Image (cartoon, grey):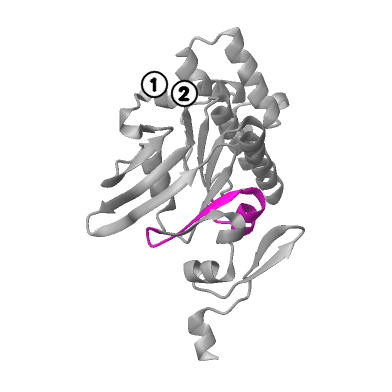
Amino acid sequence: MIELIGLSKAYGQTQVVNQASALFPPGNVTAIIGPNGAGKSTLLSMASRLTDSDAGEVLIGDKPLSEWSNEALAKRLAVLRQANNVNMRFRVRELVAFGRFPHSKGRLTADDDTVIDEALAQLGLTELQDRFIDQLSGGQRQMAFIAMVVAQNTDYIFLDEPLNNLDIRHSVAIMKTVRDLAHRYNKAVVVVMHDINFSACYADNMVAMKDGEVVSSGPVDEVVTKPVMERIYEIEFEVEQINGQRICLYYGAATPALALAQ
């Protein structure tokens, strides 16, 4: 279990995150949603120690994040950041092998190779493993980066907007993999996402943010409601139940300003 307690972060006079608390339980996918500038990525960065918090605490297990060594943390928590720029020309397998560095320190063993093989297979990349990263499509490239995170074999996985610029097929494949990691392997997977319906369909829990604050958190059915969605996004929403899943209808909805003008 990862617990965030009253995290805050300001840049100058701008309060980016304000007293945010959340739980990331094992065996669950937790989606962090909210409009641009809500503080989603900053919250995830503080939870993974990529960004220092101004106040609050992060507990991994029962141990404060500040007490974890970098080496021990890398074996428990894997992070895929929003921007993944590779300046060197790597093959897919070489990239995925980087996920084993916290365990092997660059000296791959037969056990490491087995884990790499499994990660490649899980992301459907076995036949592409000898290709260079720059020869892949955007979706295939993102799959390779997620395979690297999977190969790190940690209890906790943070993915910051992994569906950016992906088509529907690759987005579905990635979210199925994310759900499988949580449910089959009992990992706590946390995903920052913009697509509410992808979040509602594949996540177990949600953390809904606006203006740096957590407006609502808990199971999907408790967060994906008309009042919460309209408060966060400031447009009209309808929430329907389809095949047991909550789906938000908002396309073509008038903004409050437009509604007043009509």
Q: Foreground residue, 65 or 258?
A: 65
Q: Which residues are magenta?
A: 193-213
Q: CA distance from mark 2 to mark 1?
A: 7 Å
Q: Foreground residue, 86 or 199?
A: 199
Residue matched to label 1: 71
**Residue 134 appears at what percent x and percent y?**
58, 33
Residue in view at x 52 percent, y 84 percent: 258
Instruction: Name the amino acid, label 2.
Output: Lys
Residue in view at x 55 percent, y 20 percent: 97
Q: Residues within 10 Å of mark 2 (few under 14, many from 20)?
A: some
Q: Are marks 2 and 1 in contact (CB under 8 Å)?
A: yes
Instruction: Name the amino acid, label 1.
Output: Glu
**Residue 1 appears at what percent x and percent y?**
48, 37
Viewport quadrant of the C terminus: bottom right
Q: Foreground residue, 87 or 110?
A: 110
Residue 61 in the magenta stretch? The answer is no
Residue 37 in view in this figure: no
Q: From this viewpoint, which residue is outermost toward the front?
A: 62
Q: From this viewpoint, which residue is outermost toward the left?
A: 12
**Residue 210 appears at what percent x and percent y?**
42, 62
Label 1 element class: helix
Residue 75, numbered circle: 2
Residue in view at x 31 percent, y 28 percent: 67
